[in-house]
Image (cartoon, rainbow, N blue to C red):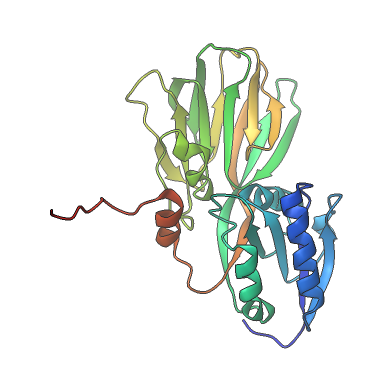
Amino acid sequence: MTTDQPIRLIILARDQSAKVQNAWQELKSFLEAQSKTEIVAAAVTEDLVLDGLDADLVVTLGGDGAILRACRQLAENQLPLMGVNLGRLGFLAELRLEQFMENFPLIQKQAYQIIDHLMFECEHCHADGSSETYLGLNEVLISSTLSSRMLDIDLSIDDEQVTTYSCDGLIVSSPVGSTAHSLSAGGPILKQDLKAFVITPICPHTLTNRPLVDRADCVYRLSMPRVPEGATVVVDGQLRRPFQEGDSVFIRKASVTFKLARIPGHSFYATINKKLGWGGQLRYRKT
């Protein structure tokens, strides 16, 4: 899509590290010098209430963690989002600051592709009948930070008992999250536009308990017959809540999607190749 109207931007540079704040100052000076550009709001020292704001594009400075935080803050009002990568990997935040500025004429015309990605709702139900629901993009993890005991985690899908994982923890991941914690635990890489979840045990006691992939329109229930000290539910590596006796966690597809804005020419497999060092086998010269 191209337009002659000013592009309205929300900038999220909440991290107080020198790297992020210096990048924000450089970006701010650059944007203020551009015509047909409006900064609707900028989060620099404090979080914004994003749910009530409207803009054409949200720009995060940092890494993929900044994008995860932004998705949660946007809540039911998911806006197109583009990440400026100031970290290392950056599967979602792909553009360096200089690349963002080089491509700004395209961004200004909104000549970018918006790709919808699966998000999830994690409903944490307590034994007393109360519950909280968290919106997430990457994964839900159940683990224990204080106990060295193995966890027995029951998995049900659409009310059908699947198995009990004896493991150090269990990850339920979206396709976007499949290149994060799940990948390091031995899970498969899912292409980001798939509508599926992957369940990955961490250090399973039974070697035949392998990662499992199933549809996104299923409801996944996790529970534990015996809850060790320090058991925790972690959403996107950022939200941490204690998991107690009688608790259950339900994971389902969210009603909203993460809207990732990408410059033309993006390739998922090229990104995987670059970020994970998939250069293929080394070829040796004959001597």
Q: Is residue 95 above or below residue 243?
A: below
Where is residue 256? Give x, y as percent: 65, 56
Residue at x 82% of width, y 75% of height: 32
- Which of the 4 image quarters holds residue 116? bottom right
Q: Is residue 57 left or right of residue 284?
A: right
Nearest to the observer: residue 278 or residue 180: 278
Relative to 263, residue 116 above or below: above
Point 60% across, 34% down: residue: 250
Q: Quadrant of residue 10?
A: bottom right
Q: Residue furthest front?
A: 287
Residue 233 shows in the view? yes
Would residue 159 be seen by someone viewing this image from the given angle?
Answer: no
| Residue furthest left in the image | 287
Where 141 sits versus 242, above or below?
A: below
Name of the residue lying farthest toward the bottom: 4
For the residue pair 114 and 87, the one nearer the viewer reads as 87
Spot occupied by residue 166 in the image (x, y as percentages of width and height): 45, 18
x then y, percent, for residue 15: 76, 48
Q: Position of residue 271 (x, y in %)?
A: 45, 58
Please name the residue shown 72% across and 52% down the image: 19
For the point 43% across and 56% down, the residue is 274
The number of callouts visible is 0
Of 118 and 50, nearer the camera is 50
